[in-house]
Image (tube, rainbow, N blue to C red):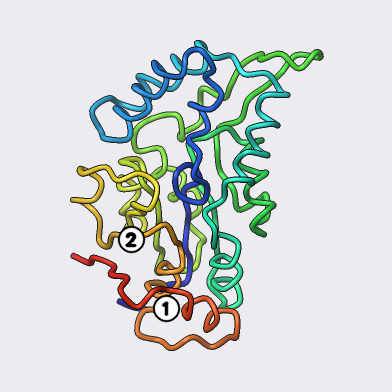
Amino acid sequence: MPRFATVIFDCDSTLSAVEGIDELAGPHREASSALTNAAMRGELRLEDVYGRRLELIRPSRAQIEALGRLYVERLVPDARETIAALRAEGIAVRIVSGGLLPAVRAVARAVGVPDEHVAAVDVWFDPRGAFAGWDSHSPLARSLGKRAQLERWNGMPRPVMIVGDGITDLEARPPADIFVAFAGISARDPVLAGADAVIRIRSLAPVLRLALGEDEPRTLEARALLATIPNHTTVTTF
């Protein structure tokens, strides 16, 4: 593979071990989780479940702020180091998520990705902080939405890699040049089957190895991170 110029990460079950909407669901968690998994396997269209989940849960500002903190607490152990190494190597990093924007931005700030390179679904609150609505026009609340978002980001340096765990990430290739399935948290067979490469350990460090292509790392940060990958680790490529 070539050296990649941009790497785009999903948030839920990729940068963080959390599925945000399910964490917000409380007593509705079982129903919400079933809808989430069906959508991520491609059995239901995202637009058929997104609004249903939010109207069922109606999360408050305080709940979403707490979710942002939980995302950060449960970051994949080397998420910060992987993004720092990619950026040290001159590789641009962005985050695209079907999650809720205020919580996803908390993750981005924790790993050093600026707000303008984050795309997620915005939500609104009344003056008391109660749920007042969501951006139903966001492409990220429907099937092929990540593809549409990447097309909006048409000025990104190329080639582009997208890393995630769901069918919505797979759908973003093209315009992404390759899709890397991260199975360190959740492994979904239809997603793995369509991926260009699969990471099967709970580490994002192999993303750096893939992003460098045939190049050797140029920086101390990248060399240090690559040294942490266990010798037995295999990344399946198709």
Element type where label 2 sits in the image? strand
Name the mark on residue 177: none
- Which mark is nearer the camera, 1 or 2? 2
Q: Is residue 62 left or right of residue 229?
A: right
Residue sitting at 48 percent across and 42 percent down?
12
Mark 1 or mark 2: whose residue is earlier in sequence: 2
Front-most of residues 87 and 12? 12
Question: x, y (%) of residue 123?
Answer: 63, 25
Q: Which residue is mark 2?
A: 199
Q: Amino acid at mark 2?
A: Ile
For disc 2, the neighbor class at 10 Å (few under 14, some 14 to 19, many from 20) is many
Please determine whether, in this image, residue 70 is positioned above or below residue 110: above
Q: CA distance from mark 1 to mark 2?
A: 15 Å
Residue sitting at 33 percent across and 30 percent down?
37
Front-most of residues 45 and 181? 181
For disc 1, the neighbor class at 10 Å (few under 14, some 14 to 19, many from 20) is many
Residue 198 image-quadrant placement? bottom left
Cβ–Cβ under 8 Å for marks 1 and 2: no
Element type where label 1 sits in the image? helix
Residue sitting at 30 percent across and 76 percent down?
1
Quadrant placement of the C terminus: bottom left
Q: Amino acid at mark 1?
A: Leu
Question: x, y (%) of residue 213?
Answer: 36, 79
Total marks drawn? 2
Residue sitting at 61 percent across and 77 percent down?
88
Question: x, y (%) of residue 46?
Answer: 36, 27
Q: Which residue is mark 1?
A: 212
Please determine whether, in this image, residue 34 is positioned above or below residue 237: above
